[in-house]
Every structure is written in C-alpha cells, then in structure tokens.
Image: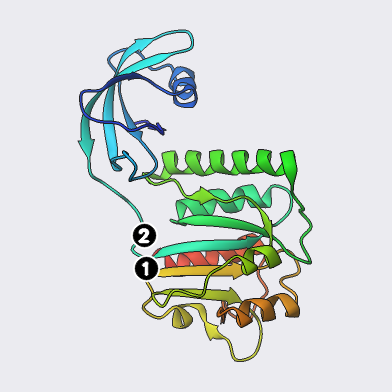
Amino acid sequence: MPRYHCPIPLHIGAELDLPAGAARHVQVLRHQPGDVITLFEGQTGNGFTGGEFDAVITHMGRSDVGVRIASHRALEREAARVVHLVVGMPANERMDWLVEKATELGVASIQPVMAARSVLKLKGDRADKKIERWQSIAISACEQCGRNQVPVIHAPQSLADWLRGQDAPDADAARLVLSLREGNQPLRAATGDAKAVWVLHGPEGGLTAQEEDWALERGWKPASLGNRVLRAETASVAALSLLALE
C-alpha cells in the first residue's frame, strides 16, 4: 500500500486535507477517491500518536486531497539500539546518499559537522537549503522502507563548536569516534551493552589528530571498523549495519 508522510496529529475518524507535499505525491500517482493509502506522522509525543494509519481518499481536487482516517496500527520498525551519527560531511551527492541509506538502516539523527579537512562548507541560506533537502530525502526513505519515525537532520556546525556544546557523556550511552589509532577497539566491542550510541567520523581525509584529541578529551572513545580506510559515507553505512541491524 502506498505510504505518505503526513506531519500533523492524526486520529481515527478524522477528515482532513493532506499537507501540500503529501497531496502532491498522491496526485502524481493518480490515486482516485475510494483508494486506501497509508499515512504516518513521522514522530511521537506532543500530540502525535506514532505508528501508521490507513486513510480513504474522499476528494481529489486540482491542488488538494481530502482523506478520512479509517484505522491505526501501533507499528514501529525502529532498531533496538538508538544510533546517532556525527558526520564530517562528504562533498557533492555523497551526503545525499548517506542520508538516504542511513535512514533506511535506522539512524535516529544525523549531525553534519565541518572539520578541518571538510571540502563542503555550509552556512546561511545555503545551509538552510541543504538541511531542507536532506530532511526531504530522509522522509522519502522512510516512505520507501516502512519506517514511521523520521530521523532528525540537524543544522551543520563546525566540529569544534559542536563538541564544545556537548554535555558530559551519559553513563547509558556510548560515544565513539572512528579512529585508526593504535589501541582502539572494534566498534561493536567498544559499544558494549549501550542502548544509545553516538558515532563520530571525519570527512574526506578523516579527522586531524587534534580533532580526535578534542573528542577524546570530552569522553569519547576511539573505535575501529577495521584496518581499511573507508570513505566517509561508507563509514556511516558500515557503522549502522553493525549497530542498528543487530
């Protein structure tokens, strides 16, 4: 059944017009009144129910689509372990690909950071447009893969500023920086039994020694994905495959 993100609180029996984005997708796929579609809010709390809803199309206008919410399934497809990525942004379309695949693999949030070796530098309107694009990619990936929770894509920051703004590590969470230094542990071993994991890695060229030192001084621990040097976007996918798909 076709799935659409509908970021407003939903409940059984409600009759409403779909938000513009969802309505446009429904029209593009040439749905008709009487068709049943699946809607998901993309979050829980603050009036949102979570799960997914079956909705019957009641009206197809030129620019609006009316639906009636028929049923609800309290169904989530989230990973047992919550994984947050702190990513030294790769350049060009690689960040788009990273956001899509990380969403499919169950990432809870993505914090893009600009490190010393970052090629991509974002601020102002350009940063705002990129965030909007990446969030849209995450929504589309959720529609495709069956997730009902849309990961948050945070505003890009410099790595130094982001690290300075972090509190002391939570005792129940693991904060790991991917590193090729001697003495690091394999990622899964370094994670232990933590139910929440933060994974930090660099952009093309990796983090500098000083940047790794900053993270370690703030309680992060070095971890490894093996002895091969992975691209930034590959590192994210590899880490999530190990952690979120367990």
Q: In terms of image quadrants, where is residue 54?
A: top left
Q: Is residue 222 above or below residue 100?
A: below
Q: Position of residue 19 (x, y in %)?
A: 44, 24
Quick check: 43 left or right of 24?
left
Q: Which residue is mark 2?
A: 79
Residue at 72%, 70% in the rendered image: 206
Is mark 2 in CB contact (under 8 Å) with mark 1? yes
Q: Position of residue 193 (x, y in %)?
A: 36, 78
Instruction: Name the residue at the bottom extreme.
Output: 183
Nearest to the observer: residue 213 or residue 202: 213
Quick check: 232 left or right of 17?
right
Quick check: 57 left or right of 158?
left
**Amino acid bearing label 2:** Ala
Quick check: 184 left or right of 82?
right
Residue at 58%, 86% in the rendered image: 184
Q: Secondary structure at mark 2?
A: loop
Residue at 44%, 13% in the rendered image: 64
Q: In terms of image quadrants, where is residue 230?
A: bottom right
State which mark lies toward you, 2 or 1: 2
Q: Quadrant of the N terminus?
A: top left
Instruction: Name the residue at the top extreme.
Output: 62
Q: CA distance from mark 2 to mark 1?
A: 8 Å
Disc on the earlier residue, 2 or 1: 2
Q: How is the image coloured?
A: rainbow
Q: Quadrant of the C terminus?
A: bottom left
Q: Residues within 10 Å of mark 1 (few under 14, many from 20)?
A: few
Nearest to the observer: residue 9 or residue 141: 9
Q: Which residue is mark 1?
A: 246
Q: Position of residue 232 (x, y in %)?
A: 66, 63
Q: Is residue 128 above or below residue 152?
A: above
